Amino acid sequence: MSKLSADLIQAVHAVEAKYGSTSKAPYGCPELQACHQIVLKMAGSPEGDVHRQIIVIRRLMKRELTHEAIALKLGLSLSTVNKRIRQIGAGEGHEIAGN
């Protein structure tokens, strides 16, 4: 697992500890902003950014967020989120996600 992935997991746990879940966290709270910053760093990484997006989107889908909410939280376009979700459905990205 990369350092950014580990940092993101810790940041998400901090949000969940304070608010119960990421979906209950108010938009703009410092803990959620920390998650957004880490995701932006991950997305900016030239190698493996698609797989990282797939991992994060899969985790957010498990929390039953809508596609629109995922796009908003990750700072991605809705079309990018939908494309990654189709890739998840096709079984791509599982070798990195460990699922």
Image (tube, rainbow, N blue to C red):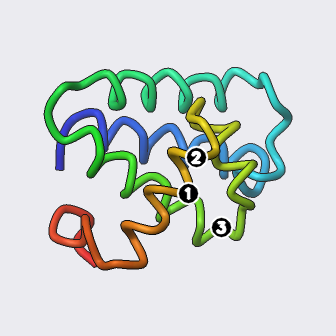
| Residue 4: assigned label | none
Is 49 situated left or right of 81 in this image? left
Is 17 situated left or right of 23 in this image? left
As measured in the structure, the alpha-carbon distance from the residue carrying label 2 to the one carrying label 1 is 5 Å
Q: Is residue 72 above or below residue 83?
A: above
Q: Do the residues bearing badges 2 and 1 touch, measured as CB atoms within 8 Å?
A: yes
Q: Viewer-nearest of labels 2 and 3? A: 2
Q: Amino acid at mark 2?
A: Ser
As measured in the structure, the alpha-carbon distance from the residue carrying label 3 to the one carrying label 1 is 16 Å
Q: Which residue is mark 1?
A: 82
| Residue 63: assigned label | 3
Q: Amino acid at mark 1?
A: Asn
Q: Quadrant of residue 48?
A: top left
Residue 95 is situated, as x and y percent measured from the top left of the image, at: 15, 70
Q: Which residue is mark 2?
A: 79
**Helix, strand or loop status at disc 3:** loop
Q: Is residue 64 above or below residue 75?
A: below
Is 78 situated left or right of 46 in this image? right
Count neighbours of disc 2 (C-alpha within 10 A) and say few if under 14, some if 14 to 19, many if 20 or more.
few
Residue 40 is situated, as x and y percent measured from the top left of the image, at: 44, 24
Q: Viewer-nearest of labels 3 and 1? A: 1
As measured in the structure, the alpha-carbon distance from the residue carrying label 2 to the one carrying label 3 is 20 Å
Q: Amino acid at mark 3?
A: Arg
**Helix, strand or loop status at disc 1:** helix
